[in-house]
Image (tube, rainbow, N blue to C red):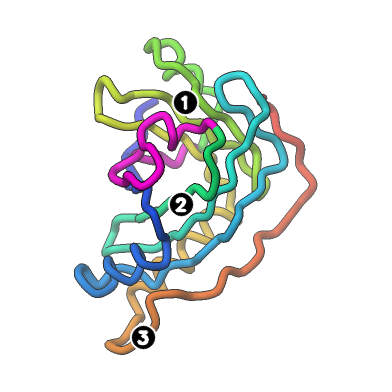
């Protein structure tokens, strides 16, 4: 199963500044800020260590944009590519409706599953595909509440007016108590 690229993600020093710059230059956003994101389950290269990271999510036309800021020096998929003070492209993301099949496909292709997590009632995994695309590839489940969240972000982008803020508040996702199947 091959899924389209849904998202382009960038590691930045300041997510609010990045969101403001992309808003001003490209008309991207508004961006939803998720400060100090925590997961329910997490692994980085076989260990449970989880870095302190914040995210910003928004749209530029049909493209979902993510900014990532790491607040500490914990080993991570971000520090695998960038030292403190550096920034740049980090990963492409694909929404998948069969997480197990997509995960197995990337493993069968020989890519290392560098990070896997369960948060907001959905699985995500990051495969080290730097030899192909210069970054990582994220597969991310697509349950209805996630699709609704992305649709809300896209509607906000389509409806923004000159002078609107580059930031919007995050609505908490619906939690249905499901358990992760992997990790």
Q: Which residue is drawn at 42% across and 67% down?
A: 16
- Cα–Cα span, label 1 and label 2: 27 Å
Identify the residue under disc 3.
Answer: 164
Residue on which the image places disc 2: 69
Q: Quadrant of residue 36?
A: bottom right
The residue shown at (47%, 31%) is: 126
Element type at mark 2: strand
**Separation of marks 1 and 3 at Cα, in angstroms:** 38 Å
Q: Is mark 3 on a helix, strand or loop?
A: loop
**Stretch of the chain drawn in magenta:** 75-96
- Image: 112 above or below 124: above
Indicate which disc, 1 or 3, sits on the residue closer to the N terminus.
1
Front residue of this view, candidates 68 and 97: 68
Question: Dot 1 corresponds to which residue?
Answer: 102
Q: How many labels does the image show?
A: 3
Residue located farthest toward the left when viewing the structure as drawn: 25
The tag earlier along the polypeptide, 1 or 2, is 2
Closer to the camera, 61 or 10? 10
Q: Which of 150 and 41 is in front in this view?
A: 41
């Amino acid at each position: 199963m091959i899924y389209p690229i849904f998202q382009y993600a960038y590691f930045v020093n300041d997510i609010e500044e990045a969101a403001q710059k992309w808003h001003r230059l490209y008309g991207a956003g508004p961006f939803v800020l998720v400060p100090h994101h925590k997961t329910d389950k997490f692994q980085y290269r076989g260990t449970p260590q989880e870095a302190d990271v914040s995210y910003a999510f928004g749209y530029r036309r049909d493209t979902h944009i993510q900014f990532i800021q790491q607040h500490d020096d914990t080993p991570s998929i971000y520090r695998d590519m960038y030292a403190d003070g550096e920034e740049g492209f980090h990963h492409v993301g694909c929404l998948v409706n069969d997480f197990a099949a997509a995960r197995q496909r990337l493993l069968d292709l020989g890519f290392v599953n560098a990070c896997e997590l369960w948060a907001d009632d959905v699985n995500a995994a990051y495969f080290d595909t730097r030899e192909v695309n210069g970054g990582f590839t994220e597969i991310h489940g697509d349950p209805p509440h996630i699709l609704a969240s992305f649709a809300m972000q896209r509607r906000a982008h389509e409806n923004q007016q000159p002078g609107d803020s580059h930031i919007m508040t995050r609505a908490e996702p619906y939690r249905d108590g499901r358990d992760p199947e992997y990790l």
